[in-house]
Amino acid sequence: MTAAEKLYQLIQTLPDNQINEVLNFAEFIHQKQHITPQTIPLGTLTGLRGIVKHPGAASSDDDLKAEYTDYLNNGSNKSAVNNIC
């Protein structure tokens, strides 16, 4: 028996409100697979220079991407906050 057949049998035993939840979840998964990941256009991060004031020379796009990725992964970037104040 395939997974689709097992799912069909299981769904037949559920009340309508739970069937709607399964349907919503299946539609979400289906929609998610059709979304293409967005890339950051070149120059976007460079254009944001000045929001956080770093002493010295301006950072390259690669440096800004690394800093932003680190910020996203760690939840906050205290050094960036300190440079704003």
Image: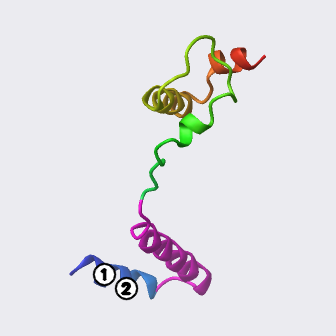
Task: Identify the colour scheme used.
Answer: rainbow
- In the picture as drawn, the residue positioned furthest to the top comes out as 56
Q: Which residues are magenta?
A: 13-36
User: Is 41 in front, or is 5?
Assistant: 41
In the rendering, at what x and y percent does residue 83 appear? 70, 16
In the rendering, at what x and y percent does residue 40 appear? 48, 47
User: Is 4 in front, or is 42?
Assistant: 42
Q: Amino acid at mark 1?
A: Ala
Report helix, strand or loop for mark 2. helix
Residue at label 2?
8
Where 56 falls versus 3 (above or below)?
A: above
In the rendering, at what x and y percent does residue 54 appear? 63, 16
Q: Is residue 12 left or right of residue 21?
A: left
The image quadrant that residue 85 belongs to is top right
- In the picture as drawn, the residue positioned furthest to the front comes out as 57
In the picture, the disc for residue 78 is none
In the rendering, at what x and y percent does residue 55 appear? 63, 11
Q: Amino acid at mark 2?
A: Tyr
- In the picture as drawn, the residue positioned furthest to the left comes out as 1
Q: Answer whether labels 2 and 1 touch (C-beta < 8 Å).
A: yes
CA distance for labels 2 and 1 = 6 Å
The image quadrant that residue 2 belongs to is bottom left
Q: Quadrant of the N terminus?
A: bottom left
Residue at label 1?
4
Q: Is residue 34 left or right of residue 74?
A: left
Q: Main secondary structure of the magenta part?
A: helix
Q: Residues within 10 Å of mark 2 (few under 14, many from 20)?
A: few
